[in-house]
Image: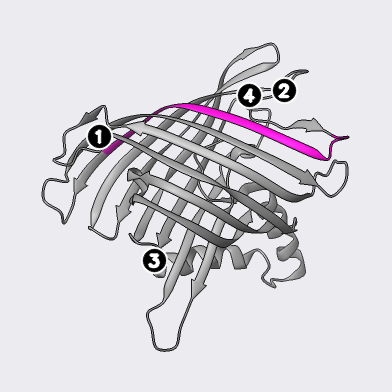
Amino acid sequence: MKRLWGILCIMVCCTGELSAQKAAGFKGWFINNVKIANSMRTLDLSEQPAQLQLTFPRYQAHSYLVNMGIAVILNNNTTLNYISDLNVEYHRNTLTDAEQNNFSAGYGFKWRFANAGAADYFMAGDLQYLYNELNATNSLGGTFLLTLFRDGKRLNWNTNNFRLNNRLLFNLAPFAGFQMQEILKSRQNGMAGFILRPEFSINTSLAFCKKAGPPYDKLLAIFCNYTGRDDAINTTSFKEHYTQLLHTGINYYLAYSPFEVSIGASFNDGSDPLNGRTQQQYWQVSVNFLK
């Protein structure tokens, strides 16, 4: 609960009343250097919004849906080949059959390591400390994903493809790489050990804008994201084999500044072992934030 309020306080601070000069300076810094999303492991246009839903009944237990990551960019210069950040993520869901309560903090990066004409080759990754509250598991983890950025006359990758006078935006973002996780300590016997997971993901979205941009203010967006992974090396006593996660749905947009705010409905099927999410299937409605 303390982690949740800490993350929410960071969001509220951006609209807080400081002195006029300090507020203006902080607002500029916040806009340029702070990112809010579901997770920080992809490039900008393929990021999914943070999700939030809280219920506080008078006589029953509280319920939470929080999928949120906040990153502070260390070197905010889009001309650089290497951009890094410090980030925290919190994933908690008490509204499903299997509860999720996972916290992580660490260092993230996006590295443009090669260029070939209209295409740029990127590695997106992070090094993190992770804590799973449900079984008191402490881990060190790393994710390293390769992808292609292409902005040309044909199909673009990791950037928008424009149709209907720039009112229809299509985005395709493929990733491939691996995860590493060293489980240091756990309440559950046999859980400690090393896991190497080759991983791939395909993220797609189709958005309808209010008018021809820029700016491209979205009215409605349909998305479909699929991730697959396998524990190629696993020295723990719990074998995962092939695991997958499907996240697909629709978002209706309410605001664009300083946050992109939407109401979303999604279908979710699968698991995410690194973030403490076990195999399950459910529908979900949430308020979403993206910056």
Q: Disc 4 to disc 1, how far (Cα)?
A: 29 Å
Q: Quadrant of the N terminus?
A: bottom left
Q: Is residue 222 magenta?
A: no
Please report the bounds of the magenta region as a residue range.
Answer: 164-181
Q: Disc 1 to disc 2, how far (Cα)?
A: 36 Å
Q: Is residue 18 left or right of residue 239?
A: right
Crowd class of label 1 (few under 14; some 14 to 19; many from 20; radius 10 Å): many
> Which comes sooner in the sequence, label 4 or label 3?
3
Element on which disc 3 rests: loop
Element on which disc 4 rests: strand
Q: Which mark is residue 151?
A: 2
Q: Which residue is mark 1?
A: 195
What amino acid is at disc 2?
A: Asp
Crowd class of label 2 (few under 14; some 14 to 19; many from 20; radius 10 Å): some
Q: Nearer the viewer, residue 226 or 199?
A: 226
- What is the magenta segment's predominant secondary structure? strand
